Amino acid sequence: MSGSLEGKVALVAGATRGAGRGIAVELGAAGATVYVTGRSTRERRSEYDRPETIEDTAELVRAAGGVGIAVPTDHLDRAQVEALVARVDDEQGRLDVLVNDIWGGEKLFEWDAPVWEHDLDNGLRLLRLAVETHAVTSHHALPLLLRHPGGLVVEMTDGTAEYNRDTYRVSFFYDLAKASVLRMAFALGHELGPRGATAVALTPGWLRSEIMLEAFGVTEENWRDATERVPHFGISETPFYVGRAVAALAADPDVARWNGQSLSSGQLAPVYGFTDRDGSRPDAWRYMVEVQDADKPADGTDGGGDGGGPDAQAVVEAYR
């Protein structure tokens, strides 16, 4: 992918950590100029109160070979988002890739809590962070993206449309948030397609994000130690795997074939020929259906992947 996105400009909204960071870095590795946004900076942390910052992400983009530009932005603040897009326009005059990855809900949802028992303020805040931010960002950024043909919008979510259609995801508010983002990509596909752009929904599998590694008490170097406790964790992937999926989509001259669809990192890997950083090609969502949800034991294989699948109860226990 090196150099395939030279001259292209991307905005990764919500790039402080996790999938957003992995996507920003891989877009940079392909040669793009990447604007990375979020609320956690070296001067001020968000309510996450974690050490990752957008400045760190921008540095990683530059180290990968791209141009990384950190812009502190609260995507619920319309004026801040409008100013962000105006800056991209002033400095670049174009926007080729918009990745809506804002989430912010890890501390807000409650596992298996029905809507009448779930904290209402937290649930509504989750919806604002996970849904309203995407709408605000698209409203302000899409006119710039449509200025040149071939633009790409990636709506990041958790779960494919097929899997989420038949599966209750965590709780009322979490389920609603993820379903909403999937539908956003479908709706944007209808609005952008006739205007020369493409929109897709994209999900990683079980992500070895900074938060998840910390929850399991491991690092990226020894993450397999966690499979002794949760064998299904073997299917997990780095944030750079889904980042490579985005870079491949952005470089595909025929990307419009995916317009309005729900995609996953594991699904796209064999299509575009990329792997995770360790050379594997985990396909978590297929594995969940064929192995985990079928109550089969993790066997360490997945047709080129590494076995396993997201285990909800394991995650619950990890966060306790």
Image (cartoon, rainbow, N blue to C red):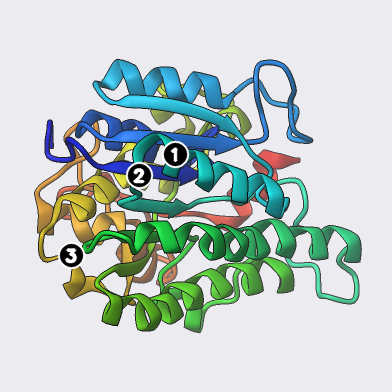
Q: Which numbered marker is on residue 90?
A: 1
Q: Amino acid at mark 3?
A: Val
User: Which disc is residue 93 wearing?
Assistant: 2
Q: Position of residue 51 (x, y in %)?
A: 65, 20
> What is the distance, in whole Å, between disc 3 and disc 2 at their CAs?
22 Å
C-alpha distance separating marks 1 and 2: 6 Å
Q: Residues within 10 Å of mark 2 (few under 14, many from 20)?
A: some
* Residue 49 in picture, x, y percent from top left: 75, 27
Q: Residues within 10 Å of mark 1 (few under 14, many from 20)?
A: few
The answer to whether 98 appears left or right of 214 in the picture is: left
- State which tag comes first along the sequence, 1 or 3: 1
Q: Is residue 163 visible?
A: yes
Residue at 45% from the left image edge and 65% from the top image edge: 159
User: Could you tell me which residue is drawn at 39 percent across and 80 percent down?
Assistant: 191
Question: Disc 2 marks which amino acid?
Answer: Gly
In contact (CB < 8 Å): disc 1 and disc 2: yes
Which amino acid does the dot numbered 1 rest on?
Asp
Q: Is the residue 96 above or below the residue 170 in the image? A: above
Mark nearest the camera among 3 and 2 is: 2
**Relative to the observer, which residue lies in front, 219 or 25?**
25
Circle 2 sits in a helix, a strand or a loop, which is it?
Answer: loop
111 relative position to 224: left or right: right
User: Which residue in the structure is indicated by mark 3?
Assistant: 255
The label nearer to you, 1 versus 3, is: 1
Any mark on residue 260, and which? none
- The residue that appears at 44% across and 69% down in the rendered structure is 293
- Residue 63 at x, y = what percent? 31, 15
